[in-house]
Each structure stands twice: as C-alpha cells, then as structure tokens.
Image: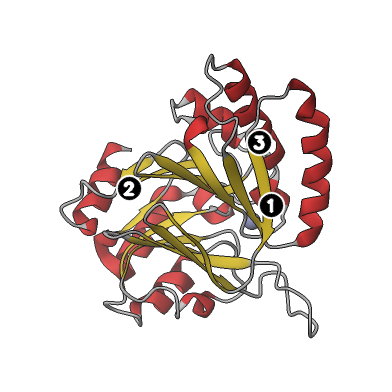
Amino acid sequence: MKLTFLGTCAGTEPMPDRLHTSLAIEHDDQIFFVDAGETCSRTAHLMGIDLLSVRAIVITHPHIDHVGGLVNLLWTIRKLNTRHPNHPLVDKTIEIYLPDPVLQTGIGCFLGESNSFGHGPNFTMKTYQDGLIYNQKRIRIYAQHNKHLGDISDGTNWHSYSLRLQTAKRTIVISGDVKHISELDPLIRDCDLLLMETGHHKVEDICHHLAKQQGRFGCLAFYHNGRAILADQAGELAKARHILGKRVLISKDKMTLNLDDAINMTTHCQTARDKR
Ligand SMILES: [Zn+2]
C-alpha cells in the first residue's frame, strides 16, 4: 500500500508549497482518494499517479479545504479517459462517498455540465453513515462520525467523519477534522499509522493525549497542517518527538509512504523523515 500526500495544508489562504488536504492511497493497482482539496488531480497527474485507476473517493466533510478540488478531479478523470485510445473506464463506475446529501446536488450540476465530452466513467454518489462503508478489492473503510461540525438533531445525518482503512497487512486511521482528539480513541486500536490533523489542535495536546494510548497505534503523521507547523515545522516536530519519540513525522505535499516495504512502521517513518 502506498500513500501519497497530495495536499497537507489546513483551510488557510494560499500557502507556498502546501495545498489543501487530499490523500491518494494505492493498493492492488486500485487508487482511493480521501478528500479532494484544491488541485489534487493536477498534483496527482503530474506526479505520475494513474487517475484512471481511481475506484473510490471518500470526502470526510463538506468544507472547501477537503472538497474544493473534487469536481476538477472528476472532470480530469473523464478527460483522461476520453483522450485514452481505448477509453478503459467507459463501462466502469467510480464511487464517491459523501457525508452530506446536499453535496450530491451541487456535484451533480457540475457533472451534467461536463457530460458534453462523453466517454464515462459513471460516477455514483453515495451518502454514508457510521460503520463499514466500503468493502471491495481487499480493502475495507470504516467511518465514525465526529463533532467537527457540531451536534445534530434527531433524525439527521452527521456531516463530518473520521476513517479507518484496513487491508490484509495494514491499518490506517485518518482523522479528518475533529472537535476533540479523544473522538479518535475507538478507531486507533492497533492501527499502523494515524494521520492526525493539526488545523484545530496543538501538537503538544495531540501528543500528550496519544501518549496515554501507548501501544494502541504505530506511527503518527501530522497532516491538514495548521499555522503552528506552517510557521515552524522543525520546532513543532521537536515538541512532538519529545513526547512520543521518533514515531512522529510531519507530512508535506508530494511525500509518499510505501507502507508495504517498511520493515516496521517506526523505521519507515524515520526513513520518510530523512528523505525530506
Ligand atoms: Zn479542514
């Protein structure tokens, strides 16, 4: 399994060398996107990621720093398929998992606009809730709501989620945006890698909380990075490592983690750090 950070910035104004949040996860020749921040498809395509291998896209919540590049991603997949001599995705379906049904309406309008250049794939939009939302291609994705967008009234859907993604070898937890760090506690048991947002939480608060969960997770990678990390990455990393040791890294745009090749995740995190 290979993880590529396409964008690692929280919802800030434009920043040098950092785009809004998006991840591409490659497993068994299939690609999954988690969130689709600004220009994620441009970054992925120019890095050589085969967007015709995308099988599912999961949006954690409907804020622009997580969904602003989605329509462009879908357009780019359709454009690449149209330009390919064999149009390999004509009869294929790409599933888009959305936490908010309102998003379906908006995205549907844009998809209608771009239908004019034809040649599939089919895009199927699904609204998801807590539990197992994807179970195909030897990959499972579980969703657990969080309170980033507040509480809900009875009978309405939660609109913000954290995710746990499992293959036969690896388990990754992706925080999305969370209100309380403790909301992740039920998800992180025995996970190899926790991707934790720092747009709404201090590095030291995150690490002190996770230090109490010793043994429950492998490595920690900060993503969706907030202003403290943007201002002083080395200083924030030092704070985190003082509490949790070398199993912490700070992701940056275009960083990749090949999780299958790692002898163990700690070694891998250090290798990824040293390559920066
Ligand atoms: Zn965000």
Front-lying residue, 175 or 50: 50
Q: In whole angstroms, how far apart are the C-alphas of marks 1 and 2? A: 25 Å
Location of mark 2 (residue): 1
- Quadrant of ligand 1: it is bottom right
Quarter location, residue 235: bottom left
Q: Where is residue 272? Give x, y as percent.
A: 29, 44
Q: Is residue 35 above or below residue 120?
A: below
Q: Residue at x 53, y 30 (%)?
A: 43
Is label 1 in a helix, a strand or a loop? strand
The residue carrying mark 3 is: 74
Residue type indicated by callout 2? Met
Q: Earlier in the sequence, mark 1 or mark 2?
A: 2
Residue at image position (63%, 71%) is 129
Q: Helix, strand or loop at disc 2?
A: loop
Q: Earlier in the sequence, mark 3 or mark 2?
A: 2
- Mark 3 residue type: Leu
Looking at the image, the residue that sits furthest to the front is 91
